[in-house]
Amino acid sequence: MPSLSKIALTAAAFAAPALGAGAAGVSTRYWDCCKPSCAWTGKADVSAPVNTCDANNNPLSSPDTKSGCDGGSAYTCGNFSPWQVSDNLSYGFAATALSGGTESSWCCACYQITFTSTSVSGKTMIVQSTNTGGDLGNNHFDLLMPGGGVGIFDGCTPQFGGLAGAQYGGISSVSQCDSFPTFLQDGCKWRFNWFENADNPALTFERVQCPSALTDISGCKRNDDASYPLPSVAGTDSSPSSKSSAAASSSSTAAAASSSAAASSAASSAAASSAASSSAAAAPSSEAGQQTQSQQQPSSTQGSGNTSAESAPTSAAGVSSSSSAALPTTSKDASKCKNKRSNKAKRHLHQHLHH
């Protein structure tokens, strides 16, 4: 028999309106390193709470570990950073506050958001809600990105000594990303590459089924996920770590082919050399006048490619313990990015709930 708390969560989810059917919304950015609100048990009708990591970015097994923002040892995992899927699509995570809903209706839900202003207008993200913004406005997505500012809660200082940048709004230059821990640098640079350093772009959003690339990282999937439509944009279910592995495998295959070709070329050269040498050294036979030519074919072995050193190991909880390998490299030149940030426009508080 289901518990009363689970019945209440299920009822709340079905009672909530269908949030985000092309609704208009707003965005901000943050990375406070704190344990996400949806990482606690009992928040929603989900498969499991959101994954968390220790101060060294290693996955934790218990959802009851106290947040690093409250003197505990649980933090946001580095592979919760956003990443580019294509020129017009990225995946990521966000804190949310949606009109007519509650935390129980949006924890671990996924949303397809399309930006409608700034230089990223027309670009799309699919984000999973992993946190709740207690001070956010209606239909507000606080996009999780390293270097976006810690806001009112700072878990980054106890985790690894803090991050560069202003408390609200974060860093102002891509070069500041190089001072971050390795497992956060790619996610930090994503802001200046794919996201073009956009300043709180407006958006429209709708609830969609979560790509496995997101749920594999978060470890959380809503039990009502299948009742929502698939994303309407062409994406991929490959996580950043599997992309890195595939790229490494492709490189290894290419290396093996190159090695094989080199061996074949060497064999041909050796054969030609041997033939010439034998012809020059051959003596005529006594009566038949025939020449004997001996040719030995050298053996060759096919080289094998190196295994990928960047493939991130995964734990039973589904969180990579090597997030620096789990993040993709974007293709745009960071020097082309526009820095539009105004300190006066960044005074919103990221007052996320951690209990």
Image (cartoon, rainbow, N blue to C red):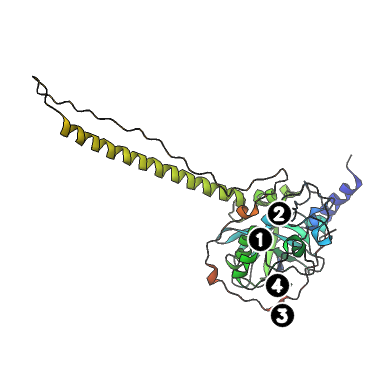
Which is more toward the observer, 61 or 161? 161
Q: How far separated are the C-alphas under marks 3 and 4?
A: 10 Å
Question: Which x, y percent locates residue 47?
Answer: 77, 46
For numbered disc 4, what is the local secondary structure? loop
- Quarter of image, res 287: top left
Task: Name the residue carrying label 4.
Answer: 169
Q: How far separated are the C-alphas under marks 2 and 3?
A: 33 Å
Looking at the image, tell me whether mark 3 or mark 4 is earlier in sequence order: 4
Looking at the image, tell me whether mark 4 or mark 2 is earlier in sequence order: 2
What kind of residue is marked 4? Gly
Q: How far separated are the C-alphas under marks 2 and 1?
A: 10 Å
What kind of residue is marked 1? Pro
Looking at the image, tell me whether mark 3 or mark 1 is earlier in sequence order: 1
The reply to whether dot 2 and dot 1 touch (C-beta < 8 Å) is yes
The numbered dot on residue 225 is: none
Against 69, residue 45 (above or below) is above
Left-right relation of 251 to 178: left
Front tag of 2 and 3: 2
Task: Name the residue carrying label 2.
Answer: 57
Q: Is residue 58 visible?
A: yes
Front tag of 4 and 1: 1
What kind of residue is marked 2? Asn
Task: Name the residue carrying label 3.
Answer: 344
